[in-house]
Amino acid sequence: MITMFPTDTPVPHGTGIVHIGLSNFHRAHQAVHTAAALASVEGPWGILGVAPRSASVADAMAAQANRYAVVEISPAGERVVVPGVHTGTAVAARDPQRVLAALAAQSTRIISLTVTEQGYTIDPRTGGLDLDHPGIRADLAGATSTAVGLLTRGLLRRARAHGAPVTVLSCDNLLGNGDVTARLAREFAAALPADEAGDLVPYLHTVTFPNSMVDRIVPATTETTRAAATRLLGADDAVPVPAEPFSMWALEDRFAAGRPAWEHTGAGVPGAVFTDDVAGYELLKLRLLNGTHSLIAYLGALAGEDLIARSAARPSIRGAAERVLHDDYRPTVRVPAGIDADDYATTLFARWSNTALGHRTRQVGSDGSLKLAQRIPGPAAEHLAAGRMPHHLALTAAAWLACVAPSPGFDPGPHAAAMAEPARERLAATASGPVAAHVRAALDLLGDPLPAAFAERVVELFGVVVRHGVEAAVAEAAGERRAA
Ligand code: CS2
């Protein structure tokens, strides 16, 4: 039996969007903003939600007429929104031909992505496509196992079938996410056999790749989320999504074949901002929010905290977070017109203090080698070039390493152990050797080579964390104690 939840959103006519990555984030961000847009201006903007591999969310949504609840949670209370904008779901690994056909359909005007930092198969040394990645190698030979392979093969079909315009919209936390996606698609196309490349390369020039900044804290679904959804909907939902009330989206208005009226407020979220200064929004968010978030997560996990809100409530971690945000990140960003940096920072600390949300340190701490590549080397290089040591960026790197590849004999605790880290094995290989070499190998994974002085500071702080713990390392980074 199909459960229909009540929704204010009219069922969209037409599926103008194919979205790759049926994550909680997509379902609580782009889907809700699309519901707001459609409530104001109708259009063919239904979304086909494509899960890359796992069928669980796709199948559960299909059994619920593609609907689910977004449960907004804050200490002030709970509220439910049912976006109702998906017109179908698919699983790429199970049904690649159906997904390729949808990507190639003339009615598809936007292909959007939330595949997380690691889903882009980037080589951190070049910032371009990792042509040695086994999935990319398979996809160049005809498979569709990676997001870049799937997307680009879909675009090749479009080029061959009709050449109708389309926009590719990345909604992940990557600096210049549209530009990066365009580069990856071009590099994939260039590596294809000559006949395929010959058809695809000219078509790619017609595809637009707007940059976008996305922001909403969206934890993993738990039994608490399900219970809240049941209470608020009066029906069971197998796949509800918890989210904070805050949501923000800033995009470049470069859409080759139209777009939903995302500038409209509704469904509990403010309208998206269309701007030529997405870079300003991205830097502000990736550094002040995501960078500081990482430090709170790693220090918190090491201090035994399961939740971000409880970590941020510890005076020492709160102090370190203030320092990394104000001393190390803020001087490296140009605040976009209309945003007050002090208010922005104050709001961040309020968002991180949402005790009801249940956002876990292990979630923010996962995939650190890929996330920190976006959060540490750029701002660190700026400070070091100006002759200043960014102590709290060094502390972030040290705390990450202590969580995912500690020295033998140091137990980082269960929350650190539960963090996913694709480079865990590689990092483990150097963990029992000299700390300087271990730190160097870890920093190399983050890309941009940083001056030796930064690595030395990470070595010192890593030593303090594993010998004396979080409080001592925070004091050391703040200059209140000498390295022991
Ligand atoms: C977090 C982000 O997991 C993380 O790395 O920093 O997911 C963060 O919650 C979102 O980007 C908020 O928009």
Image (cartoon, grey):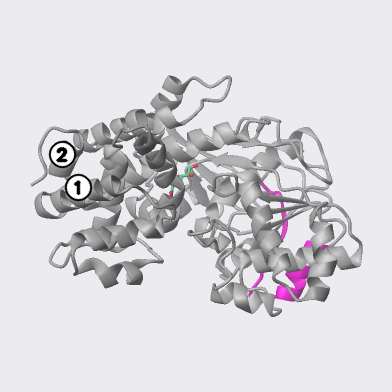
Amino acid type at image mark 1: Leu
To which quarter of the image does residue 151 belong? bottom right
Residue 82, visible in the rendered structure: no
Give SS at disc 1: helix
Name the one closer to the observer, 197 or 289: 197
Q: Which residues are magenta?
A: 82-104
- In this view of the protein, can residue 181 be seen by the observer? yes
Q: Is residue 155 magenta?
A: no
Give the residue at mark 1.
461
Q: Amino acid at mark 2?
A: Glu
Q: Nearer the viewer, residue 274 or 242?
A: 274
The residue that appears at 65% across and 42% down in the rendered structure is 211
User: What residue is at 59 percent from the left and 63 percent from the top?
Assistant: 129
Does residue 67 appear to the left or right of 380 in the view shown? right
The percent position of residue 136, horizontal first and vertical second, equals 61, 72
Residue 95 falls within the magenta-colored stretch: yes
Q: Earlier in the sequence, mark 1 or mark 2?
A: 1
- Residue 449 at what x, y percent from top left? 40, 52
Residue hosting label 2:
476
Secondary structure beneath dot 2 equals helix
